[in-house]
Every structure is written in C-alpha cells, then in structure tokens.
Image (cartoon, grey):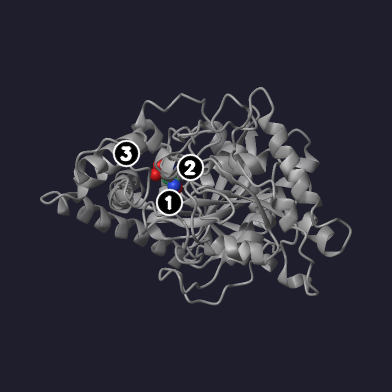
Amino acid sequence: MPSLREMADAVTSGAADPEAFVQEALRAIHGDRERDVPLNAFLSVDDEAPVRARDPVPARPAERPLAGVPVAIKDNIATLELPTTCASKILEGYRSPFEATAVRRLKAAGAIVVGKTNLDEFAMGSSTENSAYGPTRNPRDPSRVPGGSSGGSAAAVAAGLVPAALGSDTGGSVRQPASFCGVVGIKPTYGMVSRYGLVAFASSLDQIGSFGRTVHDAAVLLQVMAGHDPLDSTSAARQVPDLLSAADGSARGLVVGVPDEYFPENLDPAIRALCDRALAALRDAGAEMRRVSLPHTQYAIPTYYIIAPAEASSNLARYDGVRYGPRPSGARSTRETYELARSRGFGDEVTRRIMLGTYALSAGYYEAYYGHAQKVRALIARDFLVAFDSGVDVILTPTSPTVAFRIGEKIHDPLQMYLSDIFTVTANLAGLPAMSLPIGSIDGLPVGGQLLARRWGEPTMIRAGAALEAALSLGAAAHPGG
Ligand code: GLN
C-alpha cells in the first residue's frame, strides 16, 4: 500500500481516483477479517466510506493535504458515522451525537474515515488484551500483542490496512504500540490537539496522537489536527508551527541528551545496542551527544499509577446505566441500577483502576496518595526542564524495555504490565511531546526509539526523528541485513 504522502499526491494530481485508496483499504480490512487468524484491529468498518470520498477535490490542494487518504480512528474518539465503544461492554453500540474536533479536522483536510480500531477498554492497558471484543494481534507475529492501548491503530498501519491512524496517549498508548508494531507514533505536547470528543480517561494526561509508516506521515496528521479549539478549554491558543518542513530537516547541530536512568544496568543488551546504533547514526548526521540525568525517573510508575486511576475513577462515574450504558433490567433501586450496570459493563482492569483511584482519593488518604503523587509529578517535570535548559534539544531513550510480548504472558500480572510503561509515562506526567520510531528489530520483532522534546518542541523533535529515520535507512541500504 502506498504511503499517505503518495496517496494524497496521486489524488490531488488526478493520477488516482478519489475513491481508489479507500476501496483498497476496505478490501484489505475485509481480507484480513476473513483470514484464519485475523488481526482483529477494527471494531467497526464504514462500507459507505467510498461514497464519502466522491466529493470533488477543491481547487486548492494545499487545503486538502489528506485528499482521498483512508484513515482509522481509535474507538475512544467520537465519530458520527460509526459507533464509539471504547472497547467496553458498557458502551456497546453507543453512537455519539457529536464528532471529535480531531476527526472533523482530518475530514476537512480530505481524509476518509474507514473504521474504528480496537483498544484496551477505555484505553487502560498496554497490550489491547483488555478489549471486551477480543485482543488484537501483532502483524509481525500473530502470537504476540501489538502493544496498547492503541493496539488496533498501530496494527492496522503496520499491516498496511491503512496508511495512518489516530490513537490516544495517556501514559504511552501511542508510542508503545508504535514500538511493538514497527511504525511511527507521535504524542504531542499537552494542549496541542483538541480533546473534544476524546472519551476522558485521565484528563491531566490524555492527548490524541498519530500513527504513520514514516515520520512525515505521522507529522501530517498532527499538523492538520493541531491548534486551538473553543470546544476544549485545555487546548492552547498558540500558533501551530510548521511541522512538515521540520520533517525534511537535518540533524546538524542538534544536541541529543542521553539520560542514564533510561539505560539501566539490567536493560536488554540488544535494545541498548540498537539505541547505541541510533545515537551513532545521529552523530554521523551531525548531532552532538550529551549525557543527562533525570533523577526522579524511578518514581514515575507509582506516580502515574496513582494519578491516572484517580482521575479515571472520577471520569468513569458517568457510566451508571442511566445516561450511558444499557439500563439493567430487574433493578429495584437506583443504587442497584448503578451496581448492576457497572459490574456487568466494566471489565477487570477498568474495575481495578476505579477501585485503586477511589481509594487514592478517599478522605484520609487523599494527601498521602494523590497529593503526594502531584508533588512527585512536579519533580519529574522539573528534571526535564533542567535537562533541556542545559542546552539539550531532544532526549533519546528506548520506547519500551521489551519487544512485543506473547498474548497471555502478562495479562494475569497487572504489576508486570504496569512496569512495562516505565519509559513512556514521564512524557505525560511532564506534558512533553514524545514520539516513537523504528530503530531496528530483534529476531524479527520491531524495536522503537523514543525522542522527547521540551513543551511545544515538536518541530525540533520531528526534525530529529526524520533525520534519524533517514540516517538509519541509509545505514540499512549500506549494510543490507544490518
Ligand atoms: N499503559 C498505560 C495504562 O495502562 C497507558 C495507557 C494509555 O496511554 N492510554 O494506563
């Protein structure tokens, strides 16, 4: 399947029919569904999508940079044409009466939504195994998870079913699946993309992000979605920078920080070696390396796993079988309605988070847990400020401590699952932009490198990512099989 850039060029120049790529995507999605072991990347598909692609392409192609491009949307982002289930039984068949701003902007730029993708229920998880509609499989090895929670979007892009997709990232849910599936995933600065229509998980951490096969393709989606939205008071009223010329930039003069805490003694040596190779490629391309320290990293997991469940327990209070969720039959009181709707509607992980979060916020414990976590969060954010203020432009780390694990391997051990988020949660706690891009593979399984930048540092981050992508592909061409 052609890349996003090739598709949009072909449609705007008239070389391809506006419906052509949309039909190709639908054929690929249905083809996968008919296989013995389908990926289960999509929860719903819009077979009417080709009709929507028939709009005449307007005179100014610059206004439709996504003309005729089929895209997939994570199923916790509201769309009008298809249900929005959050992969939860409690929202089975739910149809949003409004559309997410991010989706509206993609459509205005010419993109065609072909389907909604699978996720961990309410985006809580790191493997897409917590979906009420079955796990998604990793296209590189169907016995393994695609990562999560945006596993359906990452798998759909990696398998070539669509050239690009949207995800959401609260603690790594765009970057970690991008790493596991071998694609590019960008989580923007907190406040860059409107969250109107994104179903809330943890409101101080959530951002919508993008997936593509290349840095450029993921950056185009971000460029189109970014910018102030009066419907989301947390979206920043700032000029959106030019991300696309950044995607053609070079690494010359960039200072790349390498934090000791993200390369611990016990890091998988093969992952360390691929990061070293990425750093060497950036150095050859004209960047300078500098060791930095982010001393509060060790507290990131406990801090995140207090704050995220606390906010989730509050956000998910609305699913009570009255306004949202099927009203249970046989309830004799309002209280029993709530109890039945919630115990039938939520899966185990969502229930666990609500319990953890409710406990952390309860009277007498609030200061010890939530209050304390907020203070440590400020220290984690300050570590990054100190590093960037010392003259570092971007920071490079592994995205995940492991490659994609096997389906079933961690699902009964929530703590192991949580620990695998160690390198990604910090960007959300600090509100920073971060991206994952492929830097190699171990026994055929992709490994992602993570780049982080200061708040609103997307142009620099994307420039570094594009330069790294180019340097590694030149290296691969020079050393085939390397
Ligand atoms: N894996 C993390 C969690 O379970 C992050 C999820 C996300 O970013 N939505 O909370």
| Residue beneath the point at 79% across and 67% down | 57
Disc 2 secondary structure class: loop
Q: Residues within 10 Å of mark 3 (few under 14, many from 20)?
A: some
Q: CA distance from mark 1 to mark 2?
A: 9 Å
Q: Nearer the viewer, residue 333 or 376?
A: 333
| Contact, mark 1 vs mark 2 (Cβ under 8 Å) | yes
- For the N terminus, give its image quadrant: top right
Q: Residues within 10 Å of mark 1 (few under 14, many from 20)?
A: many
| Ligand 1 under 8 Å from disc 2 Cβ | yes
Image location of residue 88, percent across then percent down: 43, 40
- Label located before the other in sequence (1 or 2): 2
| Residue beneath the point at 66% across and 61% down | 220
Image location of residue 291, percent across then percent down: 48, 53
The amino acid sitting under disc 2 is Ser
Q: Visible in this render: residue 65?
A: yes
Q: Visible in this render: residue 276?
A: no
Which label number is shown at residue 361? none
Q: Pointer 2: what residue?
A: 149
Disc 1 secondary structure class: loop
Q: Nearer the viewer, residue 156 or 269?
A: 156
Left or right, residue 236 beside residue 248: left
- Between disc 3 and disc 1, the foreground one is 3
Q: Pointer 1: what residue?
A: 170
Q: CA distance from mark 3 to mark 2?
A: 28 Å
Q: Residues within 10 Å of mark 2 (few under 14, many from 20)?
A: many
| Ligand 1 under 8 Å from disc 3 Cβ | no
Q: Pointer 3: what residue?
A: 328
Q: CA distance from mark 3 to mark 1?
A: 31 Å
| Residue beneath the point at 62% across and 27% down | 141
The amino acid sitting under disc 3 is Pro
